[in-house]
Image: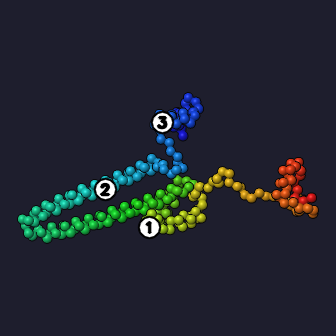
């Protein structure tokens, strides 16, 4: 919140003055509780990951262009020498095998990245006690290789439940909402907790008597 101090350099502000100052400074303030905010580091990681994929694809395209150029040269040579046709056919078969392997490897890589992203997104909804605790959780969760069913990770919720039971210290303590009841009230009976002989009064009767006469002693019996 240090970046907001400059707005209050001339003293306290009303909400309207604060709103005008924010617009003047071209600040963008969001409510983190809405869940719509994406941290710069997370955004940068996503962008860098996409850049890496583009670079890898460009490398594959360059390699394939070179392979195709070489294959065209071999075909041209085979037109003048029929004996070279067999070598060209073998080169074409080898190239097709290489492309199929590369395609499968790349698809598997994308599938793995999508899986890890799903695990990380779900882990972001949990409150960990530290960054190292979150890192350990992610490492174990990703290693479970949960089956992906559409947008679901089968078995993930059961894993989280067991993980919390096995290592509760990895998670931050949940705070009780303000105003939540602390428990049932305890009623202490007179005479050391043992009801004395005589007429018995219910709690509602005692409250009515106290409202009628605030100075009257509160006793459950006479």
The residue that mark 3 highlights is: 23
Q: In this view, does 1 lie above or below 193?
A: above
User: Can you tell which mark lies on residue 149?
Assistant: 1
The residue drawn where x is 50% and y is 42% is 29
Q: Earlier in the sequence, mark 1 or mark 3?
A: 3
Marks 1 and 2 sit apart, C-alpha to C-alpha, by 28 Å
The residue drawn where x is 20% and y is 60% is 67
Q: Which of marks 1 and 2 is nearer the N terminus?
A: 2
Are circles 3 and 2 on residues that touch, CB within 8 Å?
Answer: no
Q: Quadrant of residue 89?
A: bottom left
Helix, strand or loop status at disc 1: strand
Give the left or right position of residue 107, taking residue 123 as reference: left
Residue 5 seen from this side: no
Quarter of the picture containing the N terminus is top right
Q: Quadrant of residue 62?
A: bottom left
Q: Which of 103 and 70 is in front in this view?
A: 103
Q: Is residue 15 above or below residue 96?
A: above
Helix, strand or loop status at disc 3: helix
The residue drawn where x is 51% and y is 34% is 20
Helix, strand or loop status at disc 2: helix
Give the left or right position of residue 87, taking residue 3 as reference: left
Are circles 1 and 3 on residues that touch, CB within 8 Å?
Answer: no
The residue that mark 2 highlights is: 56
Q: How crowded is mark 1: few (under 14 residues within 10 Å), some or many (20 or more)?
A: few
Marks 1 and 3 sit apart, C-alpha to C-alpha, by 45 Å
Residue 80: image location, x then y, percent: 6, 65
Quarter of the picture containing the C terminus is bottom right
Coloring scheme used: rainbow
Residue 186: image location, x then y, percent: 79, 58
């Amino acid at each position: 919140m240090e970046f907001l101090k400059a707005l209050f350099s001339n003293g306290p502000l009303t909400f309207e003055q604060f709103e005008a100052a924010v617009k003047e400074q071209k600040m963008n303030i969001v409510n983190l509780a809405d869940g719509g905010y994406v941290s710069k580091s997370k955004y940068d990681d996503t962008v860098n990951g996409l850049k890496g994929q583009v670079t890898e694809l460009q490398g594959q395209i360059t390699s394939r262009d070179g392979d195709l150029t070489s294959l065209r040269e071999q075909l041209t040579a085979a037109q003048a020498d029929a004996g070279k046709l067999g070598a060209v056919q073998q080169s074409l078969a080898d190239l097709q095998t290489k492309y199929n392997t590369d395609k499968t490897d790349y698809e598997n890589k994308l599938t793995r990245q999508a899986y890890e992203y799903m695990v990380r997104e779900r882990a972001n909804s949990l409150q960990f006690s530290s960054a190292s605790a979150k890192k350990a959780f992610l490492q174990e969760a990703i290693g479970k290789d949960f089956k992906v069913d559409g947008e679901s990770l089968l078995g993930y919720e059961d894993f989280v439940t067991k993980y919390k039971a096995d290592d509760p210290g990895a998670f931050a303590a949940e705070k009780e909402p303000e105003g939540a009841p602390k428990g049932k009230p305890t009623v202490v009976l007179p005479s050391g907790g043992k009801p004395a002989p005589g007429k018995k009064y219910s709690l509602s009767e005692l409250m009515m008597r106290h409202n009628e006469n605030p100075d009257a002693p509160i006793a459950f019996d006479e």
